[in-house]
Image: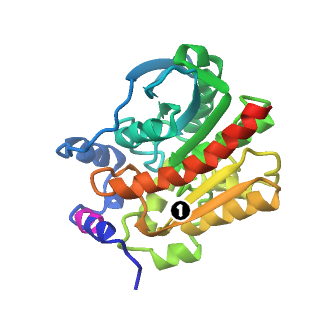
Amino acid sequence: MANLDPQAKVYLEMFSQMPALQSLDAQTVREMFALAPPVEVELAPLAKVEDRMIPVADDAEIKVRIYTPEGQGPFSLFVYYHGGGWVIGDLETADASCRMLANRTGRVVVSVDYRLAPEFKFPVPVEDSYAALKWVSENDATLNGNASNLVVGGDSAGGNLSAVVSLLAKEQNGPKIAAQVLIYPVTALGYDTKSYQEFENGFGLDRDLMIWFGNYYINSEEDTKNKYVAPLLAEDLTNLPPAYVLTAENDVLRDEGLAYAERLKQAGVRVETTIEAGLVHGYFTNMAVFPERIKESISKFTQFLSEIDQKVSRV
């Protein structure tokens, strides 16, 4: 019997009323979420929230949303990538959590609306995410930010993209990343860990649903072996930014997140991990159901980031 937080039981009951997402096509799922009635949540106070369009490859543009906390600045920066299996999700999905993130960490948070599969399969979401990272680093002054202390982070597919842009920044001598915050990240597309077996059905992110997401994202089976899809398979994880890896106890992705954390440790990277007891996949961006648990999680990695801040300030 799974250990479930009372609010997680409420969340899963709500989720069980929906049709199986993997039985639908991507556009139908997006429309279903778009038509859902808005949920009133308490929003953390900030000095400013602003949307901008930024350039990416192929003369395209994507939107970013910039959350500026109260205070004078220049502020440290946090580039955030939302979840949704690279197929669904947008700036609104992560809006309340990003507001809390900016408020409680005292960082300017830049949330990235990367293009989605299946219209834009791998590697487009990766390329958009890395382009956004470079844009933030190069335009820090216009954000009242300080690129010498820049963190990347995200949830689920966004955690995957955070890990991947950290790899790219190292390999391409790109923006200096002070830390990575990986919230129940996808780190492989094997679907075969113990947690996949334990939570295969009935815990929000079913195994078949994760396969549905993965199949929309990749072009062929060969992509599952690509380190920019599955960073757990990367041969060299040395010299990556310190990482805070946060997983949910009742989540198919739990074990691959912990496996990635272990591989980072073995490569000499500073890592801290948390398994959020009783929680399920998706809690971090569900402010209506999990506000206190989201605050607790942010407090945990804010302590980690404050130690990073001290090191950066001494350099």
Q: Residue furthest left?
A: 37
Q: How is the image coloured?
A: rainbow
Q: Residue at x 43, y 26 (%)?
A: 70
Q: Which residue lies furthest to the top in this view?
A: 142
Residue topped by disc 1: 247
Q: Residue at x 80, y 30 (%)?
A: 173
Q: Where is residue 117 in the image (x, y as percent from the top left)?
A: 47, 41
Which quadrant is home to the N terminus? Answer: bottom left
Q: Where is residue 278 in the image (x, y as percent from the top left)?
A: 42, 72
Q: Residue at x 50, y 36 (%)?
A: 120
Q: Main secondary structure of the magenta part?
A: helix
Would you say 295 lies left or right of 181 here? left
Residue 218 appears in the picture as rendered: no
Which quadrant is home to the C terminus? Answer: top right
Q: Where is residue 87 in the image (x, y as percent from the top left)?
A: 43, 45
Give the total number of marks visible in the rendering: 1
Between 141 and 224, the one lying in front of the other is: 141
Q: Where is residue 305 in the image (x, y as percent from the top left)?
A: 62, 44
| Location of residue 147 with respect to 3 vertically, above or below | above
- As shown in the figure, which amino acid type bears the numbered disc 1? Thr
| Location of residue 63 with respect to 1 vertically, above or below | above
Would you say 297 lies left or right of 261 here? left
Is 205 covered by the magenta stretch? Answer: no
Mark 1 falls on what kind of element? Answer: strand
| Location of residue 157 with respect to 310 vertically, above or below | below
Between 145 and 152, the one lying in front of the other is: 145
**What range is drawn magenta here?**
11-15
Q: Residue at x 40, y 21 (%)?
A: 51
Q: How crowded is mark 1: few (under 14 residues within 10 Å), some or many (20 or more)?
A: many
